[in-house]
Image: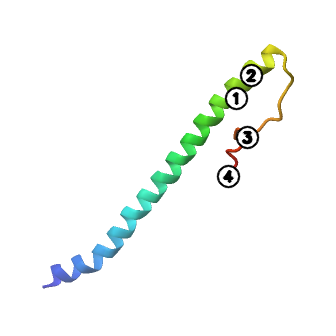
Amino acid sequence: MEIWIDAIQFAPRFENRVSNIRMVNAKFLRYLMEVRRSICWNKQDNQRKIKGRGKQEESLYPPGMQL
């Protein structure tokens, strides 16, 4: 009987932890995508600077991608 009670008490906490992990993963993936996008954007920016079209304002996100 005690085992069942423990399991019932434990279940909500476990579910909470799983959803927290999922949320952290989503945030982390979003962060990774932003970093990757900004790296790609910086590469394009550097090529633009090398070609001598003037230095653009440095931004973490490309235009239209601001959060």
Report how far apart the C-alphas of labels 1 and 4 lie in the structure: 18 Å
Q: At x 21% / y 83%, what residue is drawn?
A: 5
Density class for disc 4 (Cα within 10 Å; few <14, some 14-19, many ≥20) is few
Secondary element under disc 1, as helix, strand or loop, is: helix
Residue position marked by numbered label 3 in the rendering: 63
Secondary element under disc 2, as helix, strand or loop, is: helix
Looking at the image, tell me whether mark 3 or mark 1 is earlier in sequence order. 1
Residue position marked by numbered label 1 in the rendering: 42
Report how far apart the C-alphas of labels 4 and 2 lie in the structure: 23 Å
Between tags 3 and 4, which lies in front?
3
x, y (%) of residue 20? 44, 63
Q: At x 67% / y 31%, what residue is drawn?
A: 41
Report how far apart the C-alphas of labels 3 and 1 lie in the structure: 12 Å
Residue type beneath disc 4: Leu
Density class for disc 2 (Cα within 10 Å; few <14, some 14-19, many ≥20) is some
Q: Residue furthest top?
A: 51
Q: At x 69% / y 41%, what residue is drawn?
A: 61
Looking at the image, tell me whether mark 2 or mark 3 is earlier in sequence order. 2
Q: Residue furthest front?
A: 64
- 52 sits to left or right of 32: right
Residue position marked by numbered label 4 in the rendering: 67
The quadrant the N terminus occupies is: bottom left
Between tags 3 and 1, which lies in front?
3
Residue type beneath disc 1: Asn
Residue type beneath disc 3: Pro
- Depth order, front residue of 11/51: 51
Looking at the image, tell me whether mark 1 or mark 4 is earlier in sequence order. 1
Report how far apart the C-alphas of labels 2 and 3 lie in the structure: 16 Å
Residue position marked by numbered label 2 in the rendering: 46
